[in-house]
Amino acid sequence: MSIRWKFLAALLCISILPMIIMRVHGQASMEDLGEDLATQSANLLVHRTSQELERMIEDHARMLGLEHELMEMTLRTQSASAERSLSSPAPEDTDLYIVPQGMGMMMGRGQGWGNSMGNMSNMRSMKESAADVPSPPGAESSTWLCLAMGQSCFPQKVSMKTQAFHFYSETDDARDQARRLTRMVEYTMELADSENEPDTWQVIWLNSGVLSVYPATATVLPRHLDPRHLVSMNELRRAGRDLVWKIPMVDPFTRRSAMGVFMALHNKEREVIGGIGLIVPVGTVMRKSEHVQMLSSEAESFLVKPDKNETSGKQGLRILAREQGSERQVHHWRGIPEISWFDAGPEASISVMLEDVQHGRSGVRLVEFNGKKELVAYGVLERTDNVALLLMIPLSDVTAEAESAKAAVINSVETLITRTSLLLVVVLAAILVTAILGSRKITADLGRVVRASRALARGDFTARAHVRSNDEIGELGRAFDNMIPELAERIRMKEALGLAMDIQTHLLPHAPPHTDGFEIRGQCVYCDETGGDFFDYIPLGEESASGVLVAVGDVSGHGVPAALFMASARAFLRSRVGLGGDLDKIMSDVNNAVSHDTFGTGHFLTLFACLVHSGSAEIEFVRAGHEPGLLYDPETCTVMELSGKGTSLGAMPDMKYSVSHQSLTPGMILLLGTDGITETMDEDNAMYGRDRLKACLRDNAKRSTQEIIDAVLDDIESFGGALAKEDDVTVVVMKYTG
């Protein structure tokens, strides 16, 4: 890739990449903000709505309790009034509004609840019969009557000023009791509401065959509306003066869900002569709350009861009634003709609600009803067999404000994306122009550097870049021009060091000496091209057959100076050994020669010199400040140190050295080395040390001398790693074979 395209890529990374990152990050942040805002708002709205629904449930429960008390008080008052009226003489010249018997009264027991073709015929008969009967006196309004479950309702005139009487058996006694009951009108008119609509039905039936219905309607009642089918006389007799509640029940006139309360009527002898009841639609008690309408226009209410689902065999919540409404009617409660269940989605949800209702607890749950998430509040109604009121609001209506805020944030994000996209296009065009114009000068100067570097690669050390600019590329060109002479000098120095390394390598022995009874090997590893360590085998005569002096030395320092010092010291030692004499005298003479060259320089040389005679089991050695030799005894499997006394060579002149003697047995091994072995450091600055060297010698004693050297060098490298090459390392191993 050319520098021009790299320059373009760099500009793109510097300018556009941060913008892209900021845009992506900003977009993600705004989307997260919208999600968080919507989630938090939705949670807050759900929480507040849950509290409001729970409060509404409690309000409805209180209203129902008050209605229970009112209905109980009203029924007891009406019962007392009816018993007084029946025990008093009948008023004379009293007109009765009598609904004559018709086809509806001839319906068999239970037939009125079906949907058969016969029922449809009976419905037409009831409408025709109602049309033939004159409207009750004072009839000013109509109500919708539904006298057959599942059939269409029809309007019928009702009167709040009189009663309608039905006779099961039309006798003089029945007519007399009916006239007595007319005194009830002044009390029953109190049941009428301000809108003159029948919110409450009052029914009175007597054993003589009289049925009184208030408010009055001209409808011919079918057989199934006989109050004796709503509550049995046996129940009333068992209750005595107590009330019998039917919550919920189906209003026999409107088919709405209602609450019914009944009690027995007694004569002066306390005999049960009939019954009286009040039937109040549930909607009258629990009218649609304005607060619920504010929360959602789709709110629904249910009356449910725990029951066993015969289909699934499990307990569930059976729907007894459901609130309904239309544009021309207020909301009202309608009974459910068939068995219907409140299906709240997952079984776990309905199980919690079912358990709460069974234990009389109220609550608020988020459920799934008919495929939609709904917020449901529920509470058990008093004086019922675990009948519960449910208020249900779609969750989407509750969280509508939160979703609106989320949509606003998303719209802002989309606007931001559009604007930043346009900005990116403008910036990209500017970068392209800048890259094309600005890269020309840069590429021209870099081209000069490239051409000079290629000439240098061909060996032309006269090549120069000659870049004149004062920017970083100009500095690069000048640095390149200055580098060429230095590079040429280093190459010449490298060649000289290579030659010095070859010379020093040739100064070391190329083959082991041939001395009877001994196997001798040595190896030197330098940390630089040249070093100050050395070892040597110096024959005592013209050949090494009579004996050899094994020397291991270590010059202070590294590199070329140490190598030159080592070469001169080695020459002094070899020339002095060739003159003969005792080992201590040889060492003193060599020290004087070395001291002459090193006096005042601070350089010195440590040396371990070991004299081996062919066929002899005894060695002589002098230790001149060097590392002790390590002697391994196979009989005891121990390693001893050959120390001796002596000062480093070159430290000061006229030093005396003493010769030490050591007898050998077959199998003994002598290891001589420099301090580069024992002073090797690991990563934790721990030293290799003599103990580890002794252990390595013991572990490899049965191997050959070269294998022992290899084992020592491998162990040093394993211990020190990269740090193992910071000093020269020399190892010489002598094994006495006898």
Image (cartoon, grey):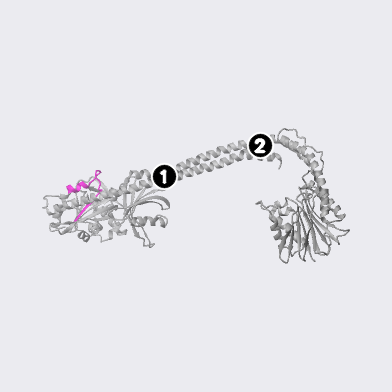
Q: Quadrant of the N terminus?
A: top right
- State yes or no: discs 1 and 2 in contact (Cβ < 8 Å): no
At which x and y percent is residue 111? 28, 60
Question: Does residue 665 appear left or right of residue 169 in this picture?
Answer: right
Question: Does residue 609 appear left or right of residue 152 in this picture?
Answer: right
- Residue 432 numbered mark, or none: 2
What residue lies at 45% left-to-right and 42% top-to-bottom? 404
Which type of secondary structure does the marked residue at label 2 adopt? helix
Q: Return the residue nearer the eye: 379 or 648.
A: 648
Above or below for 69 versus 445: below
Which type of secondary structure does the marked residue at label 1 adopt? helix
Question: Does residue 680 appear left or right of residue 233 in this picture?
Answer: right
Q: Is 684 part of what is drawn in magenta?
A: no
Tag 1 residue: 44
Q: Is 192 part of what is drawn in magenta?
A: yes
Q: Return the residue nearer the eye: 219 or 644.
A: 644
Nearer-N-terminus badge (1/2): 1
Segment colored magenta: 185-205
At label 2, counting other C-alpha atoms closer than 10 Å, the crowd grade (few under 14, some 14-19, many 20 or more) is: some
The residue at the far right in this view is: 542
Q: Disc 1 and disc 2: Cα gap in Å?
A: 51 Å
Q: Name the kind of residue labelled 1 in the image.
A: Leu
Question: Does residue 110 appear left or right of residue 435 in this picture?
Answer: left
Q: Return the residue nearer the eye: 203 or 732.
A: 732
Above or below for 26 versus 621: above
Residue 509 at least partly seen: no
At which x and y percent is residue 504? 82, 51
